Each structure stands twice: as C-alpha cells, then as structure tokens.
Amino acid sequence: MHNVLLRLALATAAFCSVADGQGLPVRGIHLAAPKPDEVPLALRFISEALPKEGVNVLVLEINYRYQFQRHPEVADADPLAADQLRQISQAARSAGVQLIPMINLLGHQSWARKTFGLLRSHPEFDETPGLYPDNADIYCRSYCPRHPEVHALLFDLIDELMEVTGAEVFHAGMDEVFLIGEDACPRCKGRSRAELFAGEVKTIRDHLASRNRRLWIWADRLIDGETTGIGKWEASLNQTAPALALLPRDVVLCDWHYEAAHPTATSFALAGFDVVSSPWRRPAVALGQLAQIRDARAHSTPLVRNRMLGMLHTTWVGFGPFVRAYFGEEKNPFVQAAESVLCFRELYRELRATGALEASR
C-alpha cells in the first residue's frame, strides 16, 4: 500500500511543477480520438499547436474506437490500431504533453439509436435489460455496476489502453448518468444511487491504484442540482450527489460548466479533492472559471491551493472538425466547432498572458 500511495503522489507531482512559467499545473484539452485517417492531422496538432498554446495535458476520449486485442467484439466503427495510438502517445511525449486515455464508463453507453460497443456486444450488462427499444425515451444507456462479470472486461479494456499509451492517469468519464439504481435491474433495484455511483468510482479507482495509476472523472454527478439550482445536466437531480463524501480523495474531479461559471471547483477543493475546471464554447465562462481557480490559489491555504490544479478545455464536436477549424482549414466549420476554438484561444491567451504572475505567487 505504501508503494501505491507513493506512486500516486508522484503522479500528482508531475502536474504540480510550475517551472515552465505557465503557472497552473494542469493546462489541458479534451478531444475525441481521431479517426484512423485523421492520425496525421492529430500528430500535427499535438506537435505544433499544443506546445504553442501552452497545453500540457491531453485527455483523449477513445471509448470503444480502438482495436482491442483482448475483447475485439467491443470495437466501434473507425477504431484506431495499436500502432496509431502509439504514434499519438509518442507525439504527446515529444511535445511535453501528458496523454490521458478515456473511456466513458457507467453512463453514455449509447447515443440516439446507436448502442456503443460494450452493451452492443454484451447486452447482459445493461442496467435496463430489454427496455427502451432503439433507445427511445432515454438519454443514454448505462451498464449495471453490480453485474458480476462487467469489471473483469472493463479492466481488460482499461489496462490495454494504459499499456499501449504508457499513461499513468485514466479518465473514466461518468458524467450525465441518469439510469442508475433502476427498478428493471435485479441487482440495483432499491439501492442508494449515491452508494452505487460511489462504489463504481471506487472500484475503478482501486483497480488503477493497484497498478500505480490515478483516476479522473467528470464531477457533475457529485453536485446537488436542487440545492445549487444548477439543475440536472451540470449537476444531479437523481440522488447521486451524496457520493462525494464516499469517494477516495485521490480521485481528480473535472468540474464542467458551459453556460455559467458556477463556483463549485472551490467546494470540491475544500472537500479534499484535486479539481480542474472545464469550459466548452463561451469565453466569458472559461475566463470566469480561470479567475476562480486563480483567486482560490492566491487566497487559500497551501492545501487548498495545491488542489486547484487548473483548466481542461472541452470540444464536443469530433477531433477533425475542431482541429481543422483551429487551423483554419474547414471551409464551413460547425458553429460549435468555431465557438469552441474561439473559447480555447481566448482561454489560452489569458493563461499565457498571466502565467508568469501566477507562477511567482
């Protein structure tokens, strides 16, 4: 156990150096994994754009778009091959960027009528088996966190990605989980949703910790949407928020807010968690979140200051559309791609402009 905690501490320390003058330990971007034919574009973006902007963390949402060797049945369309993912990982290392692979776990197992690789190939893991044909009347499917066989498979997927990338940190997503503790599930029916959510986070965290790796998740399910007035998307109205008190404190919380800079990151830090703030497409929100991070770091105890790790910009338009819009190579970019690029540029312009001041505090 001592060695595990030591390695986790070292993994955290890797984020906490300010010797580069940019100030905040985490200056990240979250992107969907590129399609196989977009790998050259990905290598260019990582090697050219990320160092120029000052990015030092890349969360790459792979999900099931990878040619898994241990469970090939879960692979979705346009999967990356191992050699391609290694190229991306090497490009990140060469650019001084820490790559964090991501599979969105628990919720987000479908989108619209499409069920993704895990439940498509293993419907026995579904939290609502036999319900919602064509995914009608639900947001996204969830897997059952208490199915006796689901974690052995998930751990194989996680381990394979971590081995191929050489990563020390894994992002498990876990945002917008609406189907949890459902009456249709014989294992979860009647159980506390907060305990189910916390149990799943802890199960994944414990597996990673046993291999000297650290867990990141999105933080929305840990915010009481009624008490705060934030609602059911960027916070929870389905009784998962009390899970916060049940989680190991070495889980990093990615606190995403897109329409307003809600002051929730500081509350997570005060509760003992490392936290990053995550904007999307509104520069005013991103800059408001950054101001809160910096204010907390400037006026808090060293313990709280060191938990306010920084920023993780999100994109949500696909790898190619965002990167081509960034390079000005998309003739008619999606509105959301153009907005996210603008937000990214404004946020990182501010980070570069005031980084030296932050580093000197």
Image (cartoon, rainbow, N blue to C red):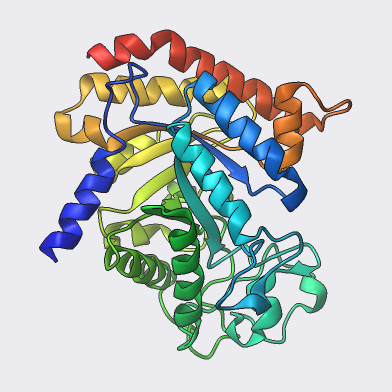
Residue 177 in the image: state x and y as whole percent: 55, 62
Quarter containing the N terminus: bottom left
Relative to 267, residue 3 above or below: below
Q: Nearer the viewer, residue 296 or 110?
A: 110
Q: Nearer the viewer, residue 101 or 332?
A: 101
What residue sits 53% from the left and 39% below the top? Answer: 91
What residue sits 51% from the left and 46% below the top? Answer: 89
Quarter containing the C terminus: top left
Residue at the extreme left: 2
Quadrant position of residue 104: bottom right
What residue sits 58% from the left and 74% below the top? Answer: 69
Q: Is residue 100 visible?
A: yes
Quadrant position of residue 73: bottom right
Horizontal side of 305 relative to 344 (left or right) equals left
Residue 34 in the image: state x and y as whole percent: 68, 47
Q: Is residue 317 visible?
A: no
Horizontal side of 337 relative to 361 (left or right) equals right
